[in-house]
Image (cartoon, helix red, strand yellow):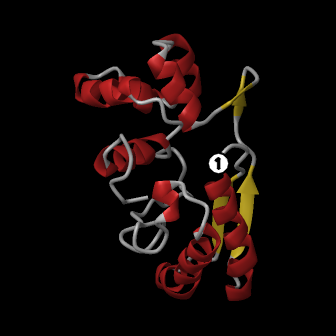
Amino acid sequence: VSEEGSIFPFDVRQRLVHEGVAKYNNVVVIPGGKYIVSAATFPGYFTKGDETVTAQTRLDAAIFAHHIAPAMGITCRYVGDEPYCSVTKAYNQALFDILPGYHIDVREMPRIEINGTIVSASRVRELIRLNEWDEIRTLVPDSTYQYLRSPEAVPIIEKIKESHSRH
């Protein structure tokens, strides 16, 4: 998601994802730009409103299937299962409904669990608020942990601690 709707700026998110998957030769990380999960095609993702989410998820999935996947040679899209967020769950369902019609396979991966805890950004933000750095270290890649403990991350950590939102 390239949109600047997160506490973490896009350039930081992108850098951490690149560092976190660097050991995998079969993973390509590309910025979504204005047309993959963006405020233009899917504003409900950012407002967390449910009124028009179904139409927006389907529009975003159709743009991906019709324009982005062919241009990038994408034949398979991976998504994580979503036990918490109804908006993300609706988006995943739209991908399952639409992408196969464009000969794009959709594969849902189960959430990773560590010591019985599902790994999620929401959980990590909660642990940051609680200053539970030992537990955070078990849930995130080392590159992310090092970033979170760096002076660069101080303003982000402060915003997380001031916020009480899941997102």
Give the side of residue 160 with respect to residue 78, left or right: left
Q: Is residue 143 above or below residue 57?
A: above
Three-letter amino acid code of the residue under disc 1? Cys
Instruction: Find disc 1 in the rendering and name its residue.
Output: 85
Residue drawn 35% across the image and 41% down it: 8
Front residue of 151/20: it is: 151
Residue drawn 56% across the image and 73% down it: 56
Q: Position of residue 86 (x, y in %)?
A: 67, 53
Q: Position of residue 12 (x, y in %)?
A: 32, 43
Q: Quadrant of the N terminus?
A: bottom left
Crowding at dot 1, Cα within 10 Å, few <14 / some 14-19 / many 20+, comes out as few
Residue drawn 42% across the image and 67% down it: 38
Question: Is label 1 in a helix, a strand or a loop?
Answer: loop
Q: Position of residue 140 (x, y in %)?
A: 53, 29
How many callouts does the rendering have? 1
Q: Residue furthest front?
A: 51
Q: Is residue 105 above or below residue 62?
A: above
Residue 31: quarter of image? bottom left
Give the side of residue 76 with respect to residue 100, left or right: left
Give the side of residue 81 with respect to residue 74, left or right: right
Residue drawn 62% across the image and 57% down it: 87
